[in-house]
Image: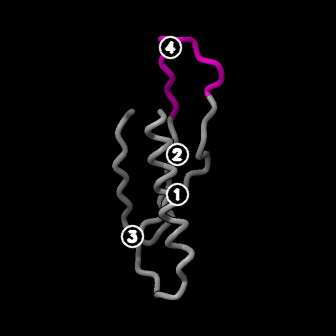
Amino acid sequence: MRMALVVLLLLSSGAAARAGDASQPTPSTGRLEVPEPAYDAGKVDRGVTIRHAFVLKNVGTADLSVDAKPG
């Protein structure tokens, strides 16, 4: 789960960095929208498996590829 959060943060920070460079024309790209970027599972006992599905939406104008692996 931590790996998924790290991947989402990296993708978000990369998109924010590109959004700040308005001097060049924007090519058709996929753009990731994550309505719920963080999930708090609360207190979890040792040995308990937590599962949570994050909704990822491509709001860009081209295909989007996300290569996330379970952590």
Q: Which of the two discs, 2 and 3, labels the residue nearer the N terminus?
A: 2
Q: Position of residue 21 (x, y in %)?
A: 53, 80
Q: Amino acid at mark 1?
A: Ser
| Highlighted range, magenta | 41-52
**Callout 2: helix, strand or loop?**
loop
Residues tagged 1 and 2 counted as in contact (Cβ below 8 A) = no
| Viewer-nearest of discs 2 and 4 | 4
Residues tagged 3 and 4 counted as in contact (Cβ below 8 A) = no
Residues tagged 1 and 3 counted as in contact (Cβ below 8 A) = no
Instruction: Report which residue position mark 1 lands on.
Output: 12
Which residue is found at the position 64% from the left and 19% from the top?
43
Which residue is found at the position 63% from the left and 32% from the top?
40
| Position of 67 relative to 16 (above/below) | above
Q: Which of the two discs, 3 and 4, labels the residue nearer the N terminus?
A: 4
Which residue is found at the position 50% from the left and 13% from the top?
48
- SS assignment for the magenta stretch, majority: loop
Q: Which of the two discs, 1 and 2, labels the residue nearer the N terminus?
A: 1
Q: Distance between the Cα atoms at labels 1 and 3?
A: 17 Å
Q: Residues within 10 Å of mark 1 (few under 14, many from 20)?
A: some
Which residue is found at the position 59% from the left and 46% from the top?
37
Q: Position of residue 4 (x, y in %)?
A: 45, 40
Q: Position of residue 57 (x, y in %)?
A: 50, 55
User: Which coloring applies here?
Assistant: one colour
**Callout 1: helix, strand or loop?**
helix
| Position of 49 relative to 29 (above/below) | above
Q: Residues within 10 Å of mark 3 (few under 14, many from 20)?
A: few
| Viewer-nearest of discs 3 and 4 | 4
Q: Distance between the Cα atoms at labels 3 and 4?
A: 39 Å
Q: Quadrant of the C terminus?
A: top left
Q: Which mark is residue 48?
A: 4
Q: Distance between the Cα atoms at labels 4 and 1?
A: 29 Å
Instruction: Report which residue position mark 2 lands on.
Output: 55
